[in-house]
Structures are given as C-alpha cells and as structure tokens.
Amino acid sequence: MKKSIRTFLKRPTKDNSNRSANPAIIRASTILFDSMQELYAHEKKIKKNQKVTHYSYGRYGSSTTIQLENILKELEEAFHVFLTGTGFGGVALAIMSLCRPGDEILVSDNVYGPTKEISEKLLKEFNVNAIFYDPDSFNDLKNKVTKRTKLILVENPGSNTFEFQDLSKIVKFAKRKKIFTFLDNTWGTPLYLKPLKLGFDMSFSSATKYFSGHSDAMGGSLAVNKKVFKQVMFFYKLSGYRMSADEAYLIIRGLRTLDTRLKKHYENTKIVINFLKKQKKIKEILYPYKPSSKNFKLWKKYYSGATGLLSVVIKSKKKSSVIKFVNSLELFGIGYSWGGFESLAILQELRSKKKDEYIQGRNYFRFKNDEHIVRLHIGLEDPTDLINDLRRSLRYIK
Ligand SMILES: Cc1ncc(COP(=O)(O)O)c(C=O)c1O
C-alpha cells in the first residue's frame, strides 16, 4: 500500500529485540563480527551503499543513527544521507568534500554567518576562492561563474533577510556548466521542499532546528545524490564527523511530529504577521506573505508550506530602544538557534564588517542607518499571548 510521507514519519522505528515502538539507543565503538570474512563482506556492502543495520565501526554511526539515515533518505528522496554532530558540521562536510586548491566557490550573499566565514576565511587558507553573489540577481550569479567554479552554495530563503531565489534556474545553469550545487534547506525542511528532486546535488538541513524541534539536540543532515556520494563519503570517513546515538534518537522522536508542528508554526506565524503588518514602527516584514511580492511568488513556485522564522525591519533612530523592545518581550526568549517549540527574538547586526568578527554583513541588502533587523521565531504558544507580548513591547521603540 502506498503511504504518504506524513504516515511514514509516524511509523514505529521498531527495536525488534525489545519489542519497543522506538529504536534502542545503541552507543557503540566496537562492533563485533563472527569472522573476518563477515567483517570484509560487511565493509564491501557499505562501500556500495547497500542497506545495512550497523556499520563496521562506531565512528561511522550505530544502528540508531542508521534508522535516522533511513528515515531522512525517504524524506529527502536521496541516494544517501550523512549525519553530523551539528548542523554546521554538515555545511563544512559538503564544502570540504568538494573543493580543492585552485577552485572557486560561488556563495549566496545571504547565507548563515559561519557559512560565510568558512567560505571567505578558512577556504582562503587552502587556496579556494569564495565569491559572493546577490541573491536577488540571477544575472549576478551567472556573471560571477568562471572556469574554476566548483560549487554553488545557496541558502533558501537567506538567513535573516529571507530572499527567495529561482532554484530551478540555478540548477539548470549549474548542470550546463558542470558545477556542483548545494542548498541549505533548514527553513523549509524536506517536507516542504525537496532540493534533490529539483536537481541539487546536496540538500542540507540543520537537524538542530525543526527536525528535533525541542531545542535539546544538535545535528546535521547532508542528503546527496549518486554523483557526489563517493567524494562526500571519502571526506566523511576521514574527518571523523558523526552524530551520537542519543542525538539520533531525539531527532527520530522529533521527526514524528514534524508535519504537525510545522503546520502550527505556520498558522501562528500568519496570525502574528496579521498583527505586525498593521504596526507603524515596523517598516517591513521579511517573510513570504504578500502575494504581489517577488519572494511570495518564488516561495509559492517551489514550496508546499512555510515555517515560523521571519524578520522585521524596525525604523528607529535609537538602536537602544530596539534592544529594549527585544529585552522586554516576556514570551520570546533571547538566544541563538530556532525551530524549537518556543518563540525567540534576536537583534541581528547585519552591517558589521569588522575583521575578526563573524562575517555576516550583507553586501546587497539595502537598509538605511536607522533601520534594524529583529529576527523572530514564532513558536507553538497561543498566538494571542504572543501578540499581546509584542504589542506591549513595541511601545518601547522610539
Ligand atoms: C540556516 C542555517 N544553517 C545552518 C545552521 C547551523 O546549524 P547548527 O546550529 O545545528 O550547527 C544554522 C544555525 O542557526 C542555520 O540557521
């Protein structure tokens, strides 16, 4: 019987020996074999990406992480899924697997801060040149490709500024030029967008966010097609990247309610946006909600849903009053990350370009000196309470 992915996510991940509906948490370094022949045969299977229930050594994972890999393989429609200990490990894995000295990497200017930092700072030390393109201009991307471009790294929508790009155009162009493609799909998750089906070579999600959903686990998922599998496997095995069995268990548990949680995040977000768009102190809401906007059209073209992360552009000559707004929120925690059950708020400094800081400053996003970006994650609380909290705190903005 054909089942929808929603049903698939609810199926028990059985622990057959204990008859539990949930998998066992297998913490293992040594995996035991009956003979050397069995060990060799097993390693051959892994090399060929054949289905296995355990690896030959704990550094590559355990039966618990394999259960998570299999769920994500189905969700992403992937050839293979590599799990890492943090989301960022997955980004680094993709870049380091494919880029070699002399190569260039073309990066969307609105990517997550550390992704910018690894591209611009670390890769430079390995003679890999990072070039940033305007996420609102496909022509800019096209013009910046050279014979040395090895990889196009896209995040959709972009961190904090939420620009949407025309993904099929990028993939089609990259294929013609024989350039690898990577998409950071953490915002939309593979439930709402399947990058590999669109033709991307790699689809990445920080499992720390909506996959786990409870702000108590960290992990990364790099889903790949057959074309890049061998190269990524080579680096994965030698880098020692791995997800622990405990985190894999928590992420499997989170995935069971991914669709239900995301639906509620979106419902709450729409209600909160309806309030925010009427507020004079808010100049702009960075989220695909206006049917006439380019971002909305591109979101609609590719996604089957939206999630709970957005930014607001606040106009104020007094940055301290914007900070006071954030500090005054009672139901929005102040802190990094997002995708958990709870609402969060954080002021994003996207102008900063100081040398030894995070390079997350934008080269293309146009905002004036008296405009400030506050990122909001709309959680699963009662949206009426969230609105009351925002209404009360907006008064502090001068
Ligand atoms: C879009 C995006 N990609 C990657 C990451 C990195 O994930 P992690 O925090 O799990 O390392 C983050 C973290 O905030 C993110 O927002």
Image (cartoon, rainbow, N blue to C red):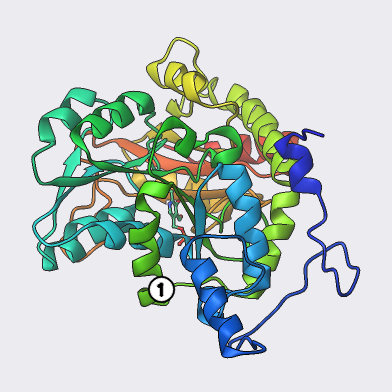
Quarter holding the N terminus is top right
> Farthest right residue?
19
Query: Considering the numbered disc 1 on the image, is that residue within a helix, a strand or a loop?
Result: helix
Pointer 1 local density, CA inside 10 Å: few below 14, some 14–19, many at least 20:
few
Q: On screen, 53 above or below 57?
A: above
The image position of residue 317, as x and y in percent, is: 31, 37
Q: Which residue shows up at 38% across the image and 43% down it?
A: 201
Point out the quarter of the image occupied by ligand 1. bottom left
The image position of residue 192, as x and y in percent, is: 58, 33
- In the picture, measured across the screen, residue 145 lies left or right of residue 58, that is left
Residue 248 visible in the snapshot:
yes
The front one of 43 and 349 is 43
> Farthest top residue?
292
Looking at the rendered structure, the kind of residue marked 1 is Lys
Quadrant of residue 88 in the image? bottom left
Quadrant of residue 129 in the image? bottom left
Task: Identify the residue under disc 1.
Answer: 237
- In the picture, measured across the screen, residue 386 lies left or right of residue 81, that is right
The image position of residue 42, as x and y in percent, is: 57, 75
Quarter holding the C terminus is top left
Residue 366 visible in the snapshot:
no
Q: On screen, 25 above or below 340?
A: below
Q: Which residue shows up at 36% across the image and 76% down it?
A: 238
The image position of residue 54, as x and y in percent, is: 64, 73
